[in-house]
Amino acid sequence: MMLELKFDSRIVKEPIISKATLEANTLINIMRANVGARHGEMVIEVEKSRVDTVIEVFQSYGVEVSKFDRKIIKSDECVHCGACVSICPVEVFSIGKEEKVEADSIKCIHCGVCVNVCPVQALTLP
Ligand code: SF4
Ligand code: SF4
C-alpha cells in the first residue's frame, strides 16, 4: 500500500525513513521524493500488514501521513498509441489484448509525466 508523507523544515534533515524502517521493523520503498530545505513530500510503499504501525511511527515524528490514492485516470479517448507505456517509471501501462493499452492504476505514483505525452489528452491526475 502507498502512503504520502508531508513534513516541514524541522524534519527535513532527519533520517526518518531509516528510523521508521527500524522502529516499525519493516521495509519501506521510496516511490517518489521531493525534499527541499523547508518542506518535504514523499510517496512510499509499505507492506499492507504493517501500514498501521508505519503510520503511527511517522506521526510520532510529526509527519503528516495519508493513504495515497490519487491515481491516473485513462479515458475512452485513448487511441492506444503506446506513448505512455515506455515513459511511466513504474510500468502502469501495458499492451494487452488486441494491442490495446491497459492501465494498472494502483501502481501510479502521481509523477505526471504521462499526462504530457498523451496526444489526445486521455490521461488525467486527480
Ligand atoms: S502519473 Fe507517473 S506513475 Fe502515474 S501513470 Fe503517469 S507516468 Fe505512471
Ligand atoms: S499516450 Fe494517451 S492515447 Fe496513447 S496509449 Fe497512452 S493514454 Fe492512450
Image (cartoon, grey):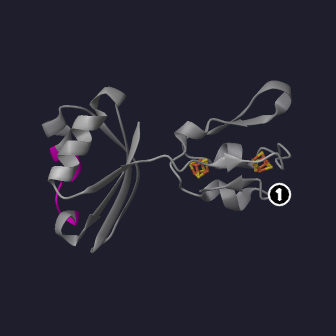
- Numbered label tally: 1
Magenta-colored span: 12-19
Does residue 15 show up magenta in the picture?
Answer: yes
In percent of width and height, residue 47 lies at 34, 30
Q: Main secondary structure of the magenta part?
A: helix
Please tell me which residue lies in front, 117 or 78: 78
Q: Amino acid at mark 1?
A: Val
The residue sitting at 53% across, 50% down in the picture is 70
Query: Which residue lies under the disc numbered 1?
Result: 120
Is 121 situated left or right of 114 in this image?
right
Q: Residue furthest bottom?
A: 38
The residue sitting at 68% across, 58% down in the picture is 115
Does residue 114 show up magenta in the picture?
Answer: no
Is 85 situated left or right of 16 in this image?
right
Is 19 situated left or right of 114 in this image?
left
In percent of width and height, residue 85 lies at 69, 43
Image height check: is 122 above or below 12?
above
Q: Secondary structure at mark 1?
A: loop
Please tell me which residue lies in front, 66 or 92: 66
What quarter of the picture does the C terminus occupy?
bottom right
Image height check: is 40 above or below 3?
below
The residue sitting at 21% across, 51% down in the picture is 59
Residue 63 falls in which quadrant of the image?
bottom left
In percent of width and height, residue 62 lies at 19, 58
The verdict on label 1 being within 8 Å of ligand 2 is yes
What quarter of the picture does the N terminus occupy?
top left
